[in-house]
Image (tube, rainbow, N blue to C red):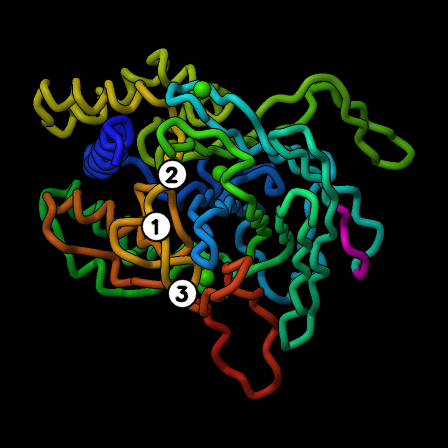
Amino acid sequence: MSNSWRKAGIALSTMALLFSFAFLSLPQTVTRAADHSEAPLADHDRPADIGDVYAFLDPSDNSRVVLAFTVVGFIVPGENSNQGAFDSHVRYRLELEETGDSTADRFIDITFDERTSRSTPQNATILLPNGTRITAPTTVPSQAATAPTRVVTTDSATGVSFFAGVADDPFFFDIPGFNRFVASVAGGTPDATQLARARDTFAGYNTMAVVISLPVSLIRTTNGVVGVDLLTQRQIKRTFKTKTGEVIYSGKFANVDRMGVPAINTVLIPFARKDEYNLAKTSDDAAGRFANDIVAALTSLGTNTDNVNILASVAVLNGDFLRLDTTVANTGPGGGNNAGAGFPNGRRFSDDVVDTILFFVANQNVIGDNVNGNDVALTDAFPYIGVSQQPRNAGVADDNTRN
Ligand SMILES: [Ca+2]
Ligand SMILES: [Ca+2]
Ligand SMILES: [Ca+2]
Ligand SMILES: [Ca+2]
């Protein structure tokens, strides 16, 4: 393990500590999720509202890296066909931080053609960091009781594999249980029994997902480490066509949402600045634009000055990127589950991010939300994410939802 990665690893572990304590310091914060619906603008723009971002080595071939993200959270299976589409006006930009600082160096841009019918795939265009442009169809969603066969496209020239379509939301978390627990902490009487519900708020619901696997050789790293975040962007000039209702977008792109490490904007940033956070750059993080908010959150908890300084400097130093060490082997089913290879080293579908957070909330005592995995099986081959939830047949009482 290189020194720089050791430093980055420590930084991210400390980051986890930082945002975990902030749960206690911000009792007025209603935790939504990893990033689902976290800010007013993103909350009102579902196609651009990032749910989660993932980065891990492909467990089937560690010379490949898998990058994945979800948008349009909480699709009810009965609405798969209506809501199961990507917005052709949104640019999904995976930023790659390849030099070890806080500024993204190259990008993977993914855009989708407009949907022409509910039974026709959308065509995705993927602009790779080396300037190569490839195209691939989405998987058409269905209302059948059995999920449609997923369409995976592999480009022979680049070795890139691509899936996009409706999928089970891989995030698992008991949001009400957690918020009730935090409220009990804020009220001065911590009540861990609030975490006994063991009900996954995301169970039974779908999301739009993009999963891409690419040779590590297509990205650059510093001592094997690459930083990843996702920006959802729209062009800023909009013209409304009163006869057709069409909106014509033009001009430069601006962020609607951005996400790297889970729960940063959701938890650490005050409500009034959440949109600003999404519109900011990772270099703004590094310049300390949100440092006072982070320091205030920690100070209100009673964290001592030394640790506030350490944690605040960590939070602003590297920018909000998931950092993946591509030299750490990832193995196991469902996209990988071997110990020590997951979050905060990148993030896999199976990583229990919430329990990692709660571990630190409880001063490194083992505590969790008792939701310890996804409600449906992850798959053992690309794209690894669980297949879409489908409307049930007659006689099937359980729809998986756990409200
Ligand atoms: Ca979001
Ligand atoms: Ca850089
Ligand atoms: Ca799920
Ligand atoms: Ca958990």
Between the residue at mark 1 and the residue at mark 2, the CA separation in whole angstroms equals: 11 Å
Label 1, on which residue? 329
Residue 274 in the image: above or below residue 55: above
Q: Secondary structure at mark 3?
A: loop
Q: Earlier in the sequence, mark 2 or mark 3?
A: 2
Q: Position of residue 277 (x, y in %)?
A: 44, 23
Tell me what residue is drawn at x 60 percent, y 71 percent.
Answer: 390
| Cβ atoms under marks 2 and 3 closer than 8 Å | no
Residue 116, given in percent of the width and then of the height, sits at 84, 50
Q: Any mark on residue 333, and which?
A: 3
Q: Residues within 10 Å of mark 3 (few under 14, many from 20)?
A: some
Q: Amino acid at mark 1?
A: Ala
Residue 354 % position (x, y): 29, 50
Is 204 covered by the magenta stretch? Answer: no
Looking at the image, residue 318 lies above or below residue 199: above
Q: Which residue occupies the foreground of this view, 211 or 16?
A: 211
- Please say if the residues under marks 3 and 1 sit with CB atoms less than 8 Å apart: no
Q: Label 1: state its secondary structure.
A: loop
Residue that badge 2 annotates: 324
Range of residues picked out in magenta: 119-123
Mark 1 vs 2, N-terminal side: 2
Q: CA distance from mark 3 to mark 1?
A: 13 Å
Rendered image quadrant of residue 19 = top left
Q: Is residue 137 visible?
A: yes
Q: Quadrant of ligand 2?
A: top left
Q: Which mark is residue 352?
A: none
